[in-house]
């Protein structure tokens, strides 16, 4: 089975990339915009700003009064959202096909004139919303602060992945209108964006509308390039976090190869082979046979400036955490020396289904429009879906085991123990 | 940038939702097939009427444990072998229990449909419920219930059902049960539920994908046509209680936020005013522009998001809503929620709100017809609630015809401000006084679970 996403790609004179993919199965259209900016572009003292800014993008622009953005889209039968990552910020609308022009109008108006409609009131209101998002999704959620704690240890303070995407509370308080305008002018430019339209549309019509709505937006210089010193963890690090949890949990995190580089797909498959399904090694050993863990997950979190490989294991209440860590180590070492063809094939089969499955839909956070922009950003090739899948299909057990040795077994990890309050003494005293 | 007019929205192109075929296997099993072109993905969903409502309160959680045990060992294969087979097929196998039915859903690639159906048949017809696997899953459930006590959102959601339906009614108990009820569930009680809750005369099989209908029917008949079990009559549900304004407070010392939830008894899925109720909820808390979200998030900045929903079931249901709010805003949130329910119940919705909600639902319906899983979910709903066969074709028109009077009437009947239960999971030391000062109903303190 070959995955083909036929598309037309062009660049407007102001630098905006436009990608169009036709699919007439259902009369809907997906609009998807990527801005090549994320939390990696923030500076210490203003962490969380890229995401706070994303919230402001829904609050109106020069020709869209406050509150009208969602009003117009809902009245057209559409849904919309946005998300901020370390590497990029995306925005999307999925609507009945007849509302294509409305969505392009709304996206172009905020790209061209958000600053003109910005106010202290809007900033303050969304600051409150975002602070509540931080409380809801991280602070008031069991284990919710684990990843941000590990990242501060895994990356040095000046590395763009040192701080969490949601940002530190004090930095959210510190953000000003001056920051908003400067960020908008530097990063929310046609040169720094890619528009993808997918669905029940005619390519020529989309290109004509894109021209009409986006071409008048003035070009701007590309944002300054990020200067990042490659980072490395010389020795294992141990961290402990007391939290309102019932079951302790161990997090192992390693630096691993950046997205789409050698070793990225290998570690992705390693994670699935180790933890997906009852017969996967880690699950089978820790949960099924020994009953010392409640659940376990191993996964590669791929990113532009370097990825991480993670093992997250939730202990049973009475489990000795040092023994649990030793067992994780043992299983990883075994996998790195001999991995069966069957295990790798099983993981690849499962991956293939979920990959094809995500392409069933044109819109949303992971449908075809987002996928085309994803490949355009990371590989400069919107149609790279099949090439991506091929990375997985061609994997053999030796390659996966070799990646496990190089990036996991022979490398240093951060080990965080999240334990119920008052039980810090249970944390393992050695990481590996 | 120069000013420009807002472009008009074009007409919705004529589009017919995919047609389905309905057949009966030789044992009477109802089969619903949709041939869908596009990517080679297929969804198979076995819908077994019964679900948690035929369970008893003292054994709450048994129905879902039974469903989860189906693939933990059969007469022919061990739990590990089955899991390996599912994974190797690259399939997702989901075993879930709802209030009115159990759902066995397989999702995978079309070329592997045959082996997927073999698997479904085997776990459905020949589960062995091995003692050691029962023991393991039972322990796993007790630990996951323990873990959920640390999750304020789940604590609040469970407490709303308990507050609204009480302990006598099945709906008052979580689908996964509690540590108390689950300790009573043993292996014989699970096999007993299996015998009652899984029978072909109570089952529907929905299959959506790029398939050849004749061939699939033959394959289904070979595998499932000999399945002959008669179901027992389901036990009656307890009567729905009548609530009274009460705040239930569950302490979470030091919590950064309060989880605030409201609830009362709601109408059944077959309610005549189902469509007006959908419009009503879209205005109240069912969309981003809804009143609850606009007030609590956009105007007040108390929360990341607020919402409400009717959970429709065959017999009665639940209306619930709420938000996670900053601790200092807890009492004001409670009074806003109570006020908004009372206001909607009394005044219905405005003409503008009606128009936006109708368009949002009617025009947006087409978005829910895209994937095999979308279609399978629609058809499962159609068969489970005995909806008319033209349901998908007429949905948009029926929404579009809803009037302001119908919404007002539905709101007056089905929103029950005088019966509202409000649950707060938060830092008692900081919220108790402000809640008491509201003088809104009785205040009761609860433990989690």
Image (spheres, rainbow, N blue to C red):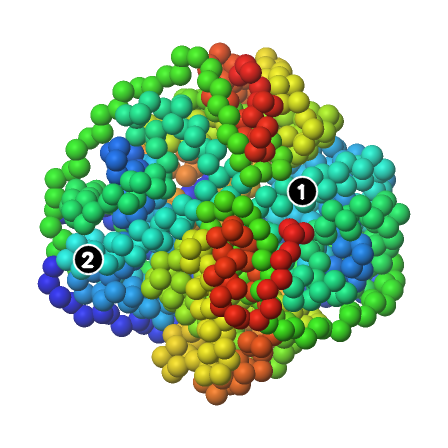
The answer to whether residue A95 is visible is no
Residue assigned mark 2: A119
Q: Residues within 10 Å of mark 2 (few under 14, many from 20)?
A: few
Q: Nearer the viewer, residue B388 or A61?
A: A61
Q: Nearer the viewer, residue A359 or A160?
A: A160
The answer to whether residue A152 is visible is yes
- Give the letter of the chain under mark 1: B
Residue at 70% in and 55% down: B175
Q: Quadrant of the N terminus of chain B?
A: bottom left
Residue at 78% in and 70% down: B238
Q: Nearer the viewer, residue A350 or A415?
A: A415
- Do pointers 1 and 2 mark residues of a single chain? no
User: In the picture shown, does residue B314 fall above or below A425?
Assistant: below
Spot occupied by residue A170 in the image (x, y as percentages of width and height): 31, 40
Q: Is residue A329 left or right of residue A201?
A: right
Q: Nearer the viewer, residue B263 or B228?
A: B263
Determine the image quadrant of residue B233: bottom right
Spot occupied by residue A76 in the image (x, y as percentages of width and height): 36, 69
Say the numbered circle drawn on residue B146. Answer: 1
Residue at the far bottom in the pictured view: B405
Q: Residues within 10 Å of mark 1 (few under 14, many from 20)?
A: some
Residue at 53% in and 32% down: A242
Label 1 residue SS: helix
Q: Is residue B304 left or right of residue A159?
A: right
- Give the letter of the chain under mark 2: A
Give the spatial CA distance, label 1 vs label 2. 46 Å
User: In the picture shown, does residue B258 fall above or below B340?
Assistant: above
Q: Is residue A203 left or right of residue A370?
A: left
Determine the image quadrant of residue B136: top right
Residue at 58% in and 38% down: A245
């Amino acid at each position: 089975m070959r995955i083909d996403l036929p598309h037309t790609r062009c660049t407007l004179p102001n630098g905006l990339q436009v990608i169009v993919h036709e699919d007439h199965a259902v009369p809907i259209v997906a609009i998807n915009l990527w801005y090549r900016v994320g939390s990696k572009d923030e500076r210490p003292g203003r962490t969380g700003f890229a995401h706070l800014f994303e919230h402001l993008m829904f609050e109106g622009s020069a020709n869209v009064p406050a509150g009208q953005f969602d009003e117009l889209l809902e009245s057209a039968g559409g849904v919309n959202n946005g998300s901020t990552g370390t590497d990029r910020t995306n925005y999307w609308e999925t609507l009945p096909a007849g509302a294509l022009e409305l969505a392009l109008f709304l996206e172009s108006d905020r790209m061209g004139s958000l600053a003109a409609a910005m106010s202290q009131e809007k900033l303050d209101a969304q600051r409150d919303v975002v602070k509540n998002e931080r409380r809801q999704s991280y602070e008031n959620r069991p284990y919710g602060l684990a990843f941000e704690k590990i990242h501060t240890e895994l990356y040095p303070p000046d590395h763009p992945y040192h701080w969490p995407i949601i940002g530190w509370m004090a930095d959210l308080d510190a953000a000003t209108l001056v920051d908003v305008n400067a960020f908008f002018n530097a990063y929310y430019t046609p040169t720094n964006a890619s528009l993808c339209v997918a669905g029940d549309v005619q390519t020529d019509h989309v290109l004509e509308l894109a021209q009409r709505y986006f071409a008048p937006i003035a070009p701007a210089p590309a944002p300054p390039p990020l200067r990042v010193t490659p980072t490395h963890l010389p020795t294992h690090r141990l961290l402990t976090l007391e939290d309102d949890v019932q079951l302790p949990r161990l997090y192992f995190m390693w630096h691993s190869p950046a997205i789409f580089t050698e070793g990225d797909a290998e570690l992705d498959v390693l994670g699935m082979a180790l933890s997906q399904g009852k017969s996967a090694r880690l699950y089978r050993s820790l949960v099924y046979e020994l009953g010392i863990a409640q659940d376990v997950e191993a996964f590669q979190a791929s990113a532009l400036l370097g990825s991480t490989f993670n093992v997250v294991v939730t202990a049973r209440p009475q489990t000795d955490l040092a023994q649990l860590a030793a067992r994780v180590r043992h299983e990883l070492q075994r996998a790195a020396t001999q991995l069966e063809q069957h295990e790798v094939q099983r993981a690849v089969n499962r991956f293939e289904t979920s990959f094809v499955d995500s392409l069933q839909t044109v819109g949303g956070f992971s449908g075809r429009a987002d996928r085309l922009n994803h490949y355009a950003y990371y590989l400069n090739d919107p149609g790279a879906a099949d090439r991506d899948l091929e990375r997985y299909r061609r994997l053999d057990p030796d390659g996966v085991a070799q990646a496990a040795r190089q990036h996991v077994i022979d490398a240093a990890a951060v080990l965080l123990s999240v334990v119920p309050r008052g039980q810090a003494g249970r944390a393992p005293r050695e990481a590996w | 940038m120069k000013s420009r007019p807002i472009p008009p929205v074009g007409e919705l192109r004529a589009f017919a939702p995919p047609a389905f075929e309905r057949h009966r296997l030789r044992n009477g099993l109802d089969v619903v097939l949709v041939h869908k072109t596009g990517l080679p993905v297929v969804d198979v969903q076995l819908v077994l009427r019964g679900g948690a409502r035929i369970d008893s309160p003292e054994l709450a959680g048994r129905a879902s444990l039974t469903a989860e045990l189906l693939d933990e060992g059969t007469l022919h294969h061990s739990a590990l072998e089955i899991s390996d087979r599912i994974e190797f097929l690259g399939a997702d196998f989901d075993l879930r229990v709802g209030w009115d039915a159990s759902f066995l859903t397989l999702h995978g690639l079309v070329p592997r449909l045959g082996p997927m159906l073999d698997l479904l048949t085997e776990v459905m017809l020949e589960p062995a419920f091995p003692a050691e696997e029962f023991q393991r899953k039972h322990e796993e459930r007790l630990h996951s219930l323990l873990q959920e006590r640390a999750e304020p959102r789940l604590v609040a959601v469970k407490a709303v059902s308990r507050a609204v339906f009480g302990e006598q009614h099945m709906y008052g108990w979580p689908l996964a049960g509690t540590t108390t009820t689950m300790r009573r569930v043993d292996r014989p009680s699970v096999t007993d539920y299996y015998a009652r809750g899984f029978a072909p005369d109570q089952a529907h099989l929905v299959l959506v994908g790029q398939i050849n209908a004749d061939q699939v029917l033959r394959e289904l008949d070979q595998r499932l046509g000999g399945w002959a079990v008669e179901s027992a009559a389901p036990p009656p549900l307890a009567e729905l209680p009548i609530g009274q304004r009460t705040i239930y407070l569950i302490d979470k010392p030091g919590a950064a936020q309060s989880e605030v939830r409201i609830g009362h008894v709601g109408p059944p899925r077959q309610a005549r005013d189902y469509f007006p109720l959908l419009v009503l909820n879209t205005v109240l808390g069912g969309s981003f522009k809804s009143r609850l979200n606009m007030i609590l998030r956009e105007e007040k900045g108390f929360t990341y998001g607020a919402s409400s929903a009717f959970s429709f079931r065959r017999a009665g249901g639940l209306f619930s809503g709420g938000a996670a709010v900053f601790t200092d805003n807890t009492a004001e949130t409670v009074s806003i929620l109570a006020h908004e329910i009372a206001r909607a119940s009394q005044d219905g919705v405005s003409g503008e709100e009606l128009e936006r909600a109708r368009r949002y639902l009617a025009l947006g319906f087409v978005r829910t017809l895209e994937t095999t899983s979308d279609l399978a979910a629609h058809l499962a709903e159609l068969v489970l609630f005995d909806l008319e066969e033209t349901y998908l074709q007429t949905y948009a028109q029926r929404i579009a015809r809803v009037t302001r009077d119908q919404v007002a009437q539905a709101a007056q009947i089905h929103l029950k401000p005088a019966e509202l239960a409000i649950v707060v999971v938060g830092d008692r030391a900081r919220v108790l006084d402000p809640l008491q000062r509201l003088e809104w109903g009785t205040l009761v303190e609860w433990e989690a679970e």
